[in-house]
Image (cartoon, rainbow, N blue to C red):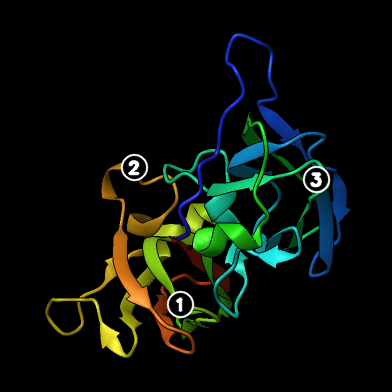
Amino acid sequence: MNEICIKLKAGEQVNPKFVPISRSATTGAAVATVTSSSQEPVFLRFLYLSMGAGVVNDVKVGNQSLNCSDSDISFALFQNDTQRKPLVGLAVDGNIQMSIDATTDADSALTGAFSCEAIETAPSISEQGNAINKFFGLGSVSLATTASGTLTAQALRNCRLKDLVLACHTASESSKIDVTDITIKGRSIFSGQSGDVVSLDALQTDTQAFTVSIDTPIQTNETVTVSLKNNHSGTLVVSGGLYCE
């Protein structure tokens, strides 16, 4: 990441702390878009979204995607109860627009907010280099009764994978999902007996004491695969993603 000095505005005066986001109704399985733009230079800290179960197709700041993979990002990475902070960490001028594309499973609404700090001036997005590496979507998969499936994503650019989050879109049934393996660049990150599994509950966004930092670099075209099994008597949808840098 490029080294840039960003100067905060004096704290004695009243300064912006939030950049609001537009509100949009969502129709199940259709992409909805909301936008946001600060009226003055700010440092975007965190992004929180209010939406039904689904996926975030993309998050863009000044037309630059913050998603480092070719797959959607689970909605769970942006929820207000997440124990892993959805850091944006980019400085923007007043003329820079942010946009979020999302798809919900059912009719819902999409809105949210960026938290921010006021700054004197903002460097261009290109000057901030790898600071746009924030998320690595794993997409979503529908698992029929007793079926197995995978979440698979390919890196679009070099980045470092950090915390992993998985979500069952029917939250009350999340304990019925087993994670049978996770491979990064073709190598399993499980170390255990054959047939043993990790409960999806261990990888949910609100699991504070079990933060799973992968902390592994990945290069363009390399893949991450999460293998899953549904033990429920009905179909369940699972999505996932990683924070990255």
Judge from the rendering whether residue 60 lies leftward or rightward of residue 198; answer left or right. right
Judge the density around disc 3: few (<14), some (14-19), many (≥20) Cα neighbours within 10 Å.
Answer: some
Q: Residue at x 83, y 61 (%)?
A: 32
Image quarter of the N terminus: bottom left
Q: Between marks 1 and 2, how big is the CA–CA gap?
A: 28 Å
Is there any visible trace of residue 133 in the rendered image?
Answer: no
Identify residue type, mark 2.
Answer: Gln
Tell me the quarter of the picture where residue 212 sits.
Answer: bottom left
Question: 29 above or below 110?
Answer: below
Disc number placed over residue 36 in the picture, else none:
3
- Depicted 88 relative to depicted 31: above or below: above
Of circles 1 and 3, which is in front?
1
Element marked by disc 3: strand
Q: Where residue 54 appears, x then y in whole percent?
A: 66, 62
Q: CA gap, disc 1 to disc 3?
A: 27 Å
Q: Which residue is mark 2?
A: 208
Q: Which residue is mark 1?
A: 158
Instruction: Residue 134: give its label.
Output: none
Examine the rendered structure and indicate whether residue 88 appears above or below residue 223: above
| Residue 79 left/right relative to 160 | right
Q: Tag 1: residue type?
A: Asn
Indicate which label's residue lies in the foreground, 1 or 2. 1
